[in-house]
Amino acid sequence: MSTIGAVIVTWNSGETIDRCIASCSGLEVTVIDNASSDDTAERVRRHPEVYFISNLENRGFAAAVNQGIARTNSDYILLLNPDVELLTPLTALAEACASGDVVIAAGRLLNQNGVTQTGFTIRALPTPAALALEALGINRLFPSNSVNRRYRCLDFSLDTEGDVEQPAGAFMLFKRDLWCRLGGFDERFSPVWFEDVDFCKRALETGRIRYFPKAVAKHRGGASVRQMEWSNRELCWYASLLRYASKHFSRFKFRGVCGAVVLGSAVRLLTGLFVRRTSQVITVYAKTAGLAALCMILGRVSPARWEGRQHTRVRTITSSTK
């Protein structure tokens, strides 16, 4: 079987990276660290078999993934979060991508208690309605609504192999050739969120994505993201949501999502003041609402200059591959 290269992006992942690397025995492992301030780099350097890239600044998840894949020689790429531990071989995933029209293969993710992570392991591609309900907080308040059930695949049996739309970027395998054909991960989704959704959306235009429940990994979940300061986490999530909607929805539907973000920001501002009791809530949701309102007026995510520099880097990725 052709070689598999695990690409792992770290940011303050010292608590989990040793177990992740240890579970990748037999794979070509590349770790890309986005300027961690903890002991992540020191821990990775204790594994001489690992190719380590240490960025002096946080380049964002998508850019770091592209860095890692560009230097990897393997035919298959396993995208793996640093808080994931492989529990089974990857044979089924690689064999699926080697034959037929399967372009991405993914397995089952378990939480720390060994329970399948329903609602996260696989999802449907987000629709305008799904993102609007996310922004309004309705999916959290009423998770059994029909839109959310479809979005989070709550009626899909995770014990059954089948075609899916959006496996978690924490644990998925694809041919290196797919990454080349798609021009890599879109680095405009920075620093994190929706870059894996966008990659799956574009991959589905070339073939199928297949889920295999017998390929299993344990996932701690959000180990790095939880270390982001709350205000930055909120702003980044909304910005990436709007970028995805701008890229893949019509202007009319995009403006609908923007309106939901504006309204949802107002609601979160009021509830946030009560819960957090800090004026920082006003700053965060005022910025979020302002960005969404501007996007609604423009009919796109931001002025033209946003489209420039990063987009050029994505288009030229394949010229830097080995």
Image: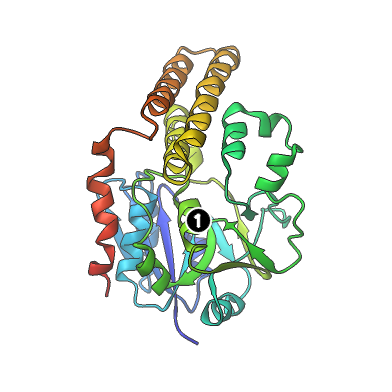
Q: Residue drawn at (58%, 78%), measured in percent from left and top? A: 96
Question: How far across and down, in percent of the image, does residue 30 sit?
Answer: 38, 67
Closer to us: 42 or 170: 170
| Quarter of the rendering occupied by the C terminus | bottom left
Element type where label 1 sits in the image? helix
The answer, for residue 43, to whether it is visible in the render is yes
**Dividing the picture into quarters, in which one does residue 73 lie?**
bottom left
**Above/below status of 196 relative to 101:** above
Which sits in the foreground, 141 or 262? 262
Q: Amino acid at mark 1?
A: Lys
Q: Quadrant of residue 90?
A: bottom right
Q: Is residue 228 above or below residue 263?
A: below
List the single residue furthest toward the bottom. Answer: 1
Q: Is residue 21 left or right of residue 179?
A: right
Q: Residue at x 51, y 27 (%)?
A: 261
The residue identified by callout 1 is 201
Residue found 75% across the figure and 56% down from its top: 156
Q: Is residue 51 visible?
A: no
Q: Residues within 10 Å of mark 1 (few under 14, many from 20)?
A: some
Q: Residue at x 76, y 64 (%)?
A: 159
Counting from the top left corner in percent of width and height, residue 100 is at 56, 80
Q: Position of residue 274 (x, y in %)?
A: 60, 12
